[in-house]
Image (tube, rainbow, N blue to C red):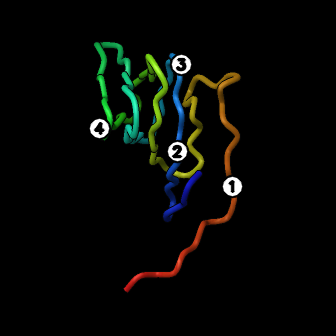
Amino acid sequence: MVARVDDYVTEVIKIQGEFMWHSHADTDELFFVVEGELTIQLRHGGCLCRCCAVVRGAPGVGGCPLAEGDVQASAVEPSGVVNTGDAGGPLTAKYDDSPRRVSAPYE
């Protein structure tokens, strides 16, 4: 986790290969590709995202991230969302419940 804003977290992630098919019943996902090419596989096709692309996953829509090489991205999602959604399993990341990061407010 990089930062927590209200009920959302921003994470920096590295993706290699195929992740796993999963969905999040009640929440969106937002990925910003920083480096590399990320394909979000969907049941009806796929979406190729290159550097500086933003992709949004809709609630309840199953998908599977796929990186042909190394991909660096940022993800924004509600706090507490399980990275593997409804699939669970060994790739499930531990939830980071560290305190909010606070910086001086700007005026």
Residue situated furthest top in the rendering: 44
Instruction: Please rate how many residues cluster around mark 2, counting C-alpha atoms within 10 Å: few if below 14, some from 14 to 19, many from 20.
Output: some
| Residue beneath disc 2 | 12
| Contact, mark 4 vs mark 1 (Cβ under 8 Å) | no
Q: Earlier in the sequence, mark 2 or mark 4?
A: 2
| Type of amino acid at the residue the image marks with label 3 | Met
Distance between mark 2 and mark 3 Cα atoms = 18 Å
| Residue beneath disc 4 | 53
Instruction: Please rate how many residues cluster around mark 1, counting C-alpha atoms within 10 Å: few if below 14, some from 14 to 19, many from 20.
Output: few
Distance between mark 1 and mark 2 Cα atoms = 16 Å
Q: Find numbered disc 2 in the image and state the secondary structure of the residue it sits on.
A: strand
Q: Find numbered disc 3 in the image and state the secondary structure of the residue it sits on.
A: loop
Q: Residue at x 53, y 22 (%)?
A: 16
Q: Earlier in the sequence, mark 2 or mark 3?
A: 2
**Disc marking residue 20:** 3
Between circles 1 and 2, the one closer to the viewer is 2
Q: Residue at x 31, y 17 (%)?
A: 46
Q: Residue at x 37, y 41 (%)?
A: 32
| Type of amino acid at the residue the image marks with label 4 | Ala
x%, y% of residue 80? 60, 48
| Type of amino acid at the residue the image marks with label 2 | Val
| Contact, mark 1 vs mark 3 (Cβ under 8 Å) | no
The reply, left or right, for residue 61 in relation to residue 14 is left
The reply, left or right, for residue 49 in relation to residue 59 is left
Q: Earlier in the sequence, mark 4 or mark 3?
A: 3
